Image (cartoon, coloured by chain):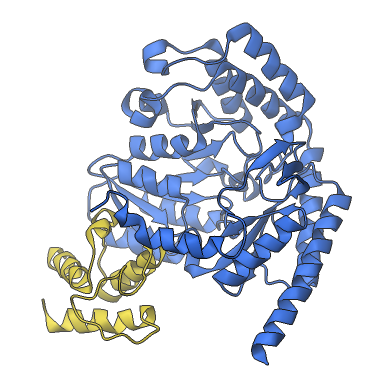
Chain colours: A yellow, B blue
Amino acid sequence: MTENVLNEIMALMQRYNPDGKPLDAGTELGADLNIDSVAAMDLIMEIEDKFDIDIPMNQVAELKTIGDLVALAEGQLQQG
Amino acid sequence: MDIFDKYAGIEQRHRALLSIGGDPFAVRVDRILSATEALIGGRRTILVGTNNYLGLTFDPACIEAGCKVLKSDGTGTTGSRVANGTYGRHTDLEAAFARFFARRKAIVFTTGYQANLATICGLAGPDDVILADADSHASIWDGCKLSPAETVIFRHNDPDHLDKRLTRLADKGQCKLVVVEGLYSMLGDTAPLKEFVEVKKKHGAFLLVDEAHSFGVFGEHGRGVAEAEGVEADVDFVVGTFSKSLGGSGGFAVSDHPKFDLLRIASRPYMFTASPSPATMATVTEALHQIETRPELRKRIWANAEQLHTGLRDLGFTLMAPLSPVIAIRMPDEATAVMAWNRLIESGVYVNLALPGGTPNGVCLLRCSVSAAHEPAQIATVLGCFAELASELDRLSKQNAA
C-alpha cells in the first residue's frame, strides 16, 4: 500500500466522515462510516476522477474497508 | 449466528421508522376504488403515488378486453415461451409495440424489471463494458450485475463525464453500452438525451434509454423523452414497462437492430420465466390503442402536473426538478419525512416516502406522481392537506429554533 494513494483516499474520505472519527486502513465503510450503496458510488467516482482510472462496479461489492479501497485503486493504477 | 443477523442494521432503522407511525413500506390497500382513490385503513384516500400516469387501470375498454380474453384463453400460460410456445397474442402485441415506436423489432417481457434485466444482460457480454448513469433504477443495476460485462458509472445526467469515461476506454476493443433513463423516477428530472446522443456517436457506443416513467407521457405521440427531444433515430434500444402508463404488468423493449431477436435465445430473464398472461396481453394491447387514439390523456396529465407543481411551490416546498408528472418534495431529514408522510396518510392522501438508499445524494423525499385521471378538485384537496402540513412543519422548525 503506497503512502500516496492512502493519503489521497483518506483526504477524499473526510467528506464521508462528518463525525470526525479517526480513520485508518481498517475503518469499515459501511459499519463505521455508514456509507450505503448510493454514497459508495459517489465515492468511487471521486476516486476514479482523482487517479484517472476506471473502477468496475463488479469489484465494488467486495469492498469492506478503506484498505480494500486503496488496494483496488492501486490495482487499477498498475493496470494503467 | 442466525441467517438474518446480517439485516440487523436495516431492521433497527425500520423499527425507528415504525415508532413514528404507520409503515410507509407496507401500506395495505383495503380496497382499490378507482385509478385515483382507495380505502386505506378504512379511510377514503386520494392516491398521488401510484405511477398510474394515464389512469388506464379502470379504463372500460381495457377491462372489457381483459375479461373477454380471460374467459376465452384462460388464466395463465403456465410457462416460458421457449418451453411452452408463444401465443398469437404475444406476437400481436410485439407487432403493436414495433408499430407504435416505428421500429423493426419488439420483445415483451413478464415484468418491467425483467425487461431491463433481460435487455442489459443479453446485450452486454464478457468483453463488453456498460456505462450506467449513477442514478439508475435498481433493475438497471441488477441487469448490470447479471451481465458478465464490466460496469462503470458516470455522474447523473452528465454527458461530459460520460465523454471522459468513454475516452478512457477508447483503446479497449469492447462494445460499449450506455444506459440512461428518460425520466428519473425519484426526482422527476429528465436526461439531456441530445447531449448524450452526441457523446455516444462520437465514441461509437450503443445507447439504451429506459422510458419506464416517460412512456405515454412525453413526446407528441407518447413515445417518451427520446421523441420529445427528437433523437429517437440515435437511440439503439428503448426499454419500457406495462405497469405505469399502460396499467398492466410486464415490460417491453424495441430496437431497429436486425439481430435484436437473438435475445430470445440468449437472455436468461426472457427464457426462464413464464410469459405474460393472455389477459395482460389483451389489456395492454387495448391500452396502447388508447394512448394512440386519445392524445387528450397527455394534455390532462400535464395540466394536473402543473396544478400540483405550482401549488406545492407556492406553499413554499422545495421541489427537486422542473415540471413533470413526478413531483418530489425535499424534506429536511428522515424523521421529519416519516412524520410528514404519516400526517398525509392520516388526512387521506397517499404519496411515496423515499429515503436514502433509494434516493440520490442521501435526500429524504415525499414523492408524488400525478395521473390524467385526477380531477382538479382532487388535486385541490391534496394541496389543502399539504398546506396544513406546511404550517405544522413551520411550527415545528420554529419550536426547534427557539
Residue B331 falls left or right of residue B256: right
Relative image position of residue B394 (x, y in whole percent):
74, 79
Identify which residue, B44 or B116, lies in the foreground.
B44
| Image mark count | 0
Instruction: Find residue B167 and report its image quarter.
Output: bottom left
Q: Is residue B45 visible?
A: yes
Residue visible at 72% across and 51% down?
B48
Relative image position of residue B292 (x, y in whole percent):
72, 30
Residue visible at 84% across and 51% down?
B378
Residue at the farthest top position: B72
- The quadrant of the rendering that contains the C terminus of chain B is bottom right
Instruction: Find residue B66 and report its image quarter.
Output: top right
Residue B210 falls left or right of residue B223: left
Residue visible at 13% across and 83% down?
A3
Q: Is residue B64 above or below residue B344?
A: above
Residue B80 falls left or right of residue A27: right
Q: Is residue B154 visible?
A: no
Q: Is residue B17 above or below residue B351?
A: below
Identify which residue, B322 or A27, lies in the foreground.
A27
Residue at the farthest right position: B377
Relative image position of residue B223 (x, y in whole percent):
63, 39
Relative image position of residue B219 (x, y in whole percent):
68, 44
